Amino acid sequence: METHTDKARLIMKVMKSAQDTVNARYMQHLLPHQLTVAQFKTLQHLYWNKEKGGMTIGELSEHIGLANSTVSSIVDRLERDDWTERRRSDDDRRKIKVILTDQAVELFRQAPKDAEEFWSNTIGRLSDEEQDALVESLIKLKDVMEKPVWPSFEQLHPKSERYTQERIHADLEEIFSLELGFIGKCLVLAEMAEEISQPEVAAYLRQVASEEITHALSAAKLLGRNADIKRNLIELAKEKLNSKEIRENLTKIVTAEKNSEILDFLSKIAADEANHKRWFKMLLRRIKTE
């Protein structure tokens, strides 16, 4: 004789099978557009909040549950493929908001038609009476499952003051890191502009970098990092080590391809890195003795 547990397992198995079918159709919908699940979810949240005039990277991060840097990378790829664009907020010019392009809006306008076709080929194969009976049974299941007052996740895992402070610290660290990367890109682009005789462009980029340095310093002070030069130098040296592995792998590939231009470029980096390594050691010794 089947127990309630046996029947519950069968129900869960059927529900999982139905969910797997929905997920498969979901992926089939994404494939023609070459979108990943994370990219589509990002577009979904932007579509649901499009009346707000877009969302900041921080807001998207909160909605999707991913780190700011991860969401920023996702948006970069979406922007590259003309799904999104960044614009300054009309309400606060300091804020950059991510909005959908016409191509992305059209994707979601088409979605209801695709969904209707999918449900017509699945639930539509049941008679009206069978559909009504299924809905009625599922509503009853929902009602009995909601009878016990289960504690929510928030009740079981209340956010402590420590959690809040750790989240603030992590977000500030991420802002600090992004600012440094942005400053570096501005300075490199300024040099490129100089090389092609665009001094005005170079001047603007250097001005932007200068202002962003102020923001980076403010973030460093809030993190208490401005007084710990030794720690920052050690982290800088570690970043060089991480990039070394990438360069070594690239060297193997371009050596096989006999690409002398890239090999010369990598060789120059390696030579400069040897000097930088000596400088870092000298600076750390000097800080230690002071």
Image: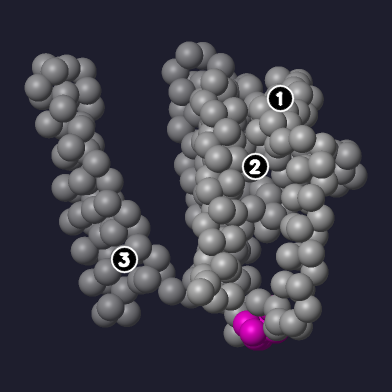
Under circle 3, the secondary element is: helix
Kindly indicate the quadrant of the structure image that contains residue 214: bottom right
Of label 1 and label 2, which has the lower sequence position? 2
Q: Inspect the image, locate mark 2, and give the three-letter code of the amino acid beneath it.
A: Thr
Which residue has dot 2 on it? Answer: 42
28 to 238, vertically: above or below: above
Instruction: Mark yes or no: residue 262 visible.
Output: yes
Q: Which label belongs to residue 234?
A: 3
Q: Position of residue 227 (x, y in %)?
A: 48, 75
Mark 2 or 3: the one toward you: 2
Q: Which contiguous range is marked in magenta?
A: 154-161
Q: Residue at x 27, y 51 (%)?
A: 242
Residue 128 versus residue 140 in the image, above or below: above
Outermost residue, top side: 196
Residue at position x 23%, y 72% from top?
Answer: 285
Residue 216 in magenta stretch: no
Q: Is 262 situated above or below 281?
A: above
Judged left or right of residue 55, residue 193 is left
Q: Position of residue 194 (x, y in %)?
A: 49, 21
Name which of mark 1 and mark 3 comes first in the sequence. 1
242 or 72, nearer to the observer: 72
Residue 272: x %, y % from top left: 21, 41
Confirm whether residue 216 shows in the render.
Answer: no
Q: Circle 1 is placed at which residue position?
A: 117
Name the residue: 21% across, 63% down: 281
